Image: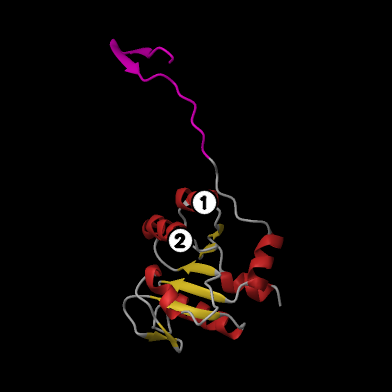
Amino acid sequence: MAPPIVFLARGLDYVAAPLRPRFHIMFRNPDHTQIEQLLRTARTIAVVGLSADPTRPSHGVARSLQRFGYRIIPVTPTADIVLGERAVPDLDHVRDALRPGETVDVVEVFRRPEYVARIVDDCIRLKFPALWLQDGVIDEAAATRAQLAGIFTVMDRCMYRDRAALG
């Protein structure tokens, strides 16, 4: 262990803790080809924070994704049915809404950043394969943790916009 460092400033002594190397893994989104592969192969998307209010961005994005052929599972405790699909209150109940042989391919998140760490905990525990954090939903530490757990993770991008760009 390195000895403490002593600073002299204006006649006062300050003792700093020994310097320790810090390793910070910066989050990086997957490349375009990997994102395209996910969007072309996914079939079922659990949308956390999907609003029943048609004026909300989550509603419009999910409705548009339905038009591309994705099955949407609304994850919200405030509604029973959204976009014609039975809603579940949380990720722990998503499998209750699945049809026989169906799996969740992506968890898409429309929640404020302060909720992302808990959602990542749930995704890791429930072994969901992919996590998509919509525009403005940014938590680098949680996204990095999801990636390190083997979850395909996209952050601060619009799933609808990326899917629409594929044609």
In the depicted structure, whether residue 113 falls above or below residue 145: below
x 56%, y 53%: residue: 150
Query: Image quadrant of residue 48?
Result: bottom left
166 to the left or right of 144: right
x 70%, y 73%: residue: 166
Tell me if mark 2 has few (under 14), some (14-19) or many (20+) residues whose alpha carbon lies within 10 angstroms of its own.
many
Residue 130 placed where, x, y %? 55, 63
Residue 123 is labelled as 2
x 52%, y 51%: residue: 149
Task: Calculate the distance from the C-alpha at mark 1 to the C-alpha at mark 2.
Answer: 10 Å
Quickly name the residue at label 1: 149
Nearest the viewer among 95 and 144 is 95
x 36%, y 19%: residue: 16
Q: Quadrant of the N terminus?
A: top left
Q: State the extent of the magenta-drawn residues as a range.
A: 1-24
Q: Please tell me whether mark 1 sits on a helix, a strand or a loop.
A: loop
Q: Amino acid at mark 2?
A: Cys
In the depicted structure, whether residue 129 falls above or below residue 149: below
Res 50 visible: no
Q: Quadrant of the C terminus?
A: bottom right
135 to the left or right of 43: left
Q: How is the image coloured?
A: secondary structure
Q: Please tell me whether mark 2 sits on a helix, a strand or a loop.
A: helix
